[in-house]
Every structure is written in structure tokens, then in C-alpha cells.
């Protein structure tokens, strides 16, 4: 049985080094580039005809656009409009990373969202951005986030540490949620796939059971790919809301 | 797990930043404006069509109002024509009635005059007859001719006594 961890291994395709910094083009990088290309092609080619009554591809592009625009409008309000391109890019990047990771792509097949460094970097950008926006809009008043107005002063001892922990754990929970979901899902798929092969090779019938399970889990994983992209984006929207409107 | 191997943190981060920034630039400059334009255009076209529909509706309502106004006008006109005609007819009839009744009353008057004349004549005749009859009666009873002048006075007195 293949090692279920092996699929997360990064393979440098073009080793590069700039000033002692390793910037090798790896299978992960290739998937990121592929994602960007596919997202751009999908969104530009689908609306090329600018049809009044959209076709399948165009309505799909419009659905993504309006889904994210609506999410931002509902969670952040009209002030969120200028962050729309960022939130949209974030959603598409995570979504395509998750979905392309489910595809059996030869040589470069890889799920970059299953790498904690990638998800953490994205979460940290969201966290830093949100914090900067919060201080820019509210100044030192933003510190009220950690001790809400009207709370009795005696509760500060408990409240402030709790609020601080919850605030600073945001990037970690955001990063770990996506990374863990992707990693575990892919491990389960690999393990089940291994069962199908090993059991199916010896006995035809027992292989059917893990195969059925594998099929179900595959469907579930596609659902999780969509859901985690949604969760990552909506949490970013909620943090943005907190920064703009406070509590 | 390879995820926690820091060997590839640098290339991962480098390519993440590179691809994500590229994606962001492509989204802001190409993809999102295009989709936004399509959606805006559709919204504009829908609004246009709604406006046009409202305009057409207003026009139709105006046409209905004009039609109803014309109908009311022609109805009023017809009423006045009918009224005029009936007034004219009734006045004409009245006039004719009046003329006819005048003529009739004239004829009646003429007839009455004639009747009166005939009556006077007849009464005069009655006097003559009465004188004749009285003369004859006198002649037969007495056997002598009565004095004509006395007879006449007597008859006249008798007639006057009877109120004739």
C-alpha cells in the first residue's frame, strides 16, 4: 500500500535559487500557477459573449461573482466593496486549490491548500489586513475589541485575556481548519484507495465494499472542498466586519 | 509529515505570493470588471425595459382616456341633436295646434253667427206665420177680416210676453 503521506510531498520541478533563497518551481507552485490560469480563463472566456441571457459558463461565472458580492454585502456592508477583489481572489484561489487537488493530474497533481504554510500565510494576510484596517478606522479605540464598552471593570481580568486569545487565535484557526480538512480528507481517500487495490487484487468481492465507501468519501470530499473555501472566505468577511464596525 | 518540513517553506511562500498577487491583479483589471459590466448592462437593460413598459402603459391609458372623452362628447352631441329636433317638432306641433284651434274657433264663430241669423229669420217668419194664423183664426171665428195693424201689434205683444 502506498504511503498516504507521500501525496503531500513537494517535488521540485525546476530548482531555483536567488541569493541563497530557495524559490524552486515545485509541483505545488505548478498547481498554483494552473489555478490562476484556470480561474482567469474561466472568468474571462465565459463572459466573452456578454450575453444578456447567460449560457452555462457565463451563469457560473456570474454565480461566483454574485455569491461573493452578496456574502461581502451581507457580512460587511457597503464599506466592504473595496475589499471585494481581494475576497473574491481569496475564495477562488482556495476553491480551485481544493478542487484541483481532487483531480488526478499527472506529475504535478497536488493540493496546495493541504500545506499549513500556504493556508497560514493566507490567514496571516487576512489577520494582518483586518487588524490594520481596524486601527486605521478606529485608532486606539480599536483596542475596545478586547474589552467591550459597558462591561464591569472587575471582569477585565478574565475578559481581556479571553478576548486577546480569541483574537490572536484567529489566523491559526483559519489556517489549521483548511489545512487539516484537506490533509485528513486526502489521507482518507488514499487509505481507502489502498484498501480497494489490496483487497480487490486478492478477492474481487471484498474490494467492492471499500470501493463504495471510497466513492461516497470522494463525493463528500468535493463537498468539503467547496465548504472549506466558503468557510475560509466567510470568516475573513466576518473578521473584516469586526474591524470595520467593531462588535 | 511533509507539511511541517521547513525545507520548502521558502519556495511555497514565494510562489504563493507570486501567484496570488498575479491572480489579484488579473481579477481587478480583467475578470471582475468584465463580469461586473455584463451584470450592470443586464440590470440597465432590465430597467430600460421596465421604463419602456411603464411608458407604453401610460400611453395606452392616455389613449383609453381620449377614447372615453370622445365617446362622452359624441354622446352629448347626439343628446343635444335629439333634444333640438324634439324641441323643434314640439314647437311646430304646438303652432299648428294653435293655428288649427284658431281656425276652428273662427269657423265656430261663423257658424254661430249663421245660426243666429237663421234664428232671427226664423223668428221673423214665425211672426208672419202667427199673424197669418191669427188672421185666419179671426176670420173663421168672427167671419170678418181683422184689422192688419191691430193683429200685428197683438202678435208682437204676445211674442214679447213669451220672451221671444
Image: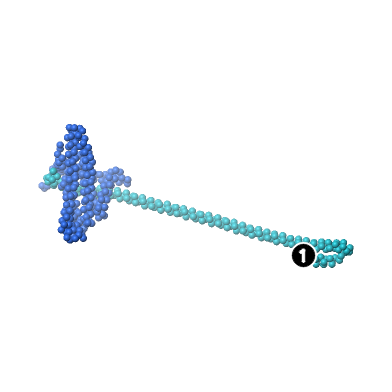
Q: Is residue A58 depicted above or below A132 in this figure?
A: above
Residue B14 placement, left or right of B97: left
Chain letter, colour blue in render: A
Chain B takes which shade in the image? cyan
- The image quadrant where one finds the C terminus of chain A is bottom left
Q: Quadrant of residue A32?
A: top left
- Tell me the element at label 1: loop
Label 1 packing within 10 angstroms: few (<14), some (14-19), many (20+): few
Depth check, front residue: B74 or A187: A187
- In this view of the protein, can residue B19 be seen by the observer? no
Residue B42 locus on image (x, y percent): 32, 49
Residue located at (15% from left, 47% from top): A117
Depth check, front residue: A141 or B157: B157
- In this view of the protein, can residue A187 be seen by the observer? yes
Residue located at (80% from left, 66% from top): B158
Depth check, front residue: B20 or A196: A196
Residue A60 locus on image (x, y percent): 27, 45
Residue located at (10% from left, 47% from top): A20
| Count of numbered badges drawn on the protein | 1
Residue A184 placement, left or right of B41: left
Residue highlighted by disc 1: B164
Q: Residue furthest left?
A: A20
Q: Is residue A91 depicted above or below B96 in this figure?
A: above
Depth check, front residue: A156 or B131: A156
- The image quadrant where one finds the N terminus of chain A is top left
Residue A62 locus on image (x, y percent): 28, 47
Amino acid at each position: 500500500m502506498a504511503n498516504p503521506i507521500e501525496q503531500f510531498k513537494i517535488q521540485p520541478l525546476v530548482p531555483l535559487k536567488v541569493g541563497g533563497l530557495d524559490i524552486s518551481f515545485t509541483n505545488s507552485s505548478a498547481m498554483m500557477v494552473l489555478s490562476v490560469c484556470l480561474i482567469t480563463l474561466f472568468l474571462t472566456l465565459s463572459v466573452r459573449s456578454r450575453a444578456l441571457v447567460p449560457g452555462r459558463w457565463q451563469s457560473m461565472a456570474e454565480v461566483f461573482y454574485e455569491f461573493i458580492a452578496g456574502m461581502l454585502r451581507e457580512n460587511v456592508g457597503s464599506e466592504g466593496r473595496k475589499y471585494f477583489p481581494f475576497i473574491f481572489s481569496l475564495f477562488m484561489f482556495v476553491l480551485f486549490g481544493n478542487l484541483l487537488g481532487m483531480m488526478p493530474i499527472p506529475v504535478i497533481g497536488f493540493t496546495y491548500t493541504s500545506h499549513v504554510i500556504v493556508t497560514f500565510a493566507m490567514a496571516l494576510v487576512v489577520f494582518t489586513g483586518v487588524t490594520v484596517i481596524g486601527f486605521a478606522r478606529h485608532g486606539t479605540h480599536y483596542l475596545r475589541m478586547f474589552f467591550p464598552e459597558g462591561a464591569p471593570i472587575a471582569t477585565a481580568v478574565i475578559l481581556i485575556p479571553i478576548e486577546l486569545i480569541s483574537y490572536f487565535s484567529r489566523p491559526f484557526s483559519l489556517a489549521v481548519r483548511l489545512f487539516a480538512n484537506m490533509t485528513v480528507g486526502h489521507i482518507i481517500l488514499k487509505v481507502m484507495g489502498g484498501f480497494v487495490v489490496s483487497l480487490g487484487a486478492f478477492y474481487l468481492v471484498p474490494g467492492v465494499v471499500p470501493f463504495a465507501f471510497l466513492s461516497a468519501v470522494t463525493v463528500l470530499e468535493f463537498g468539503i472542498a467547496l465548504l472549506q473555501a466558503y468557510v475560509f472566505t466567510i470568516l475573513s468577511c466576518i473578521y473584516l466586519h469586526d474591524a470595520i464596525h467593531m462588535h | 509529515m511533509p507539511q511541517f518540513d521547513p525545507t520548502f517553506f521558502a519556495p511555497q511562500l514565494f510562489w504563493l505570493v507570486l501567484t496570488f498577487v498575479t491572480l489579484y491583479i488579473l481579477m481587478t483589471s480583467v475578470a471582475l470588471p468584465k463580469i461586473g459590466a455584463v451584470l450592470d448592462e443586464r440590470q440597465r437593460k432590465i430597467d430600460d425595459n421596465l421604463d419602456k413598459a411603464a411608458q407604453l402603459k401610460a400611453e395606452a391609458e392616455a389613449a383609453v382616456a381620449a377614447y372615453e372623452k370622445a365617446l362622452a362628447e359624441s354622446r352629448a352631441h347626439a343628446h343635444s341633436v335629439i333634444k333640438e329636433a324634439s324641441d323643434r317638432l314640439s314647437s311646430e306641433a304646438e303652432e299648428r295646434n294653435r293655428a288649427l284651434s284658431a281656425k276652428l274657433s273662427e269657423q265656430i264663430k261663423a257658424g254661430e253667427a249663421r245660426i243666429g241669423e237663421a234664428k232671427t229669420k226664423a223668428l221673423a217668419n214665425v211672426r208672419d206665420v202667427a199673424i197669418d194664423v191669427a188672421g185666419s183664426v179671426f176670420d173663421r171665428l168672427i167671419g170678418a177680416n181683422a184689422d192688419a195693424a191691430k193683429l200685428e201689434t197683438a202678435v208682437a205683444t204676445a211674442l214679447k210676453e213669451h220672451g221671444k
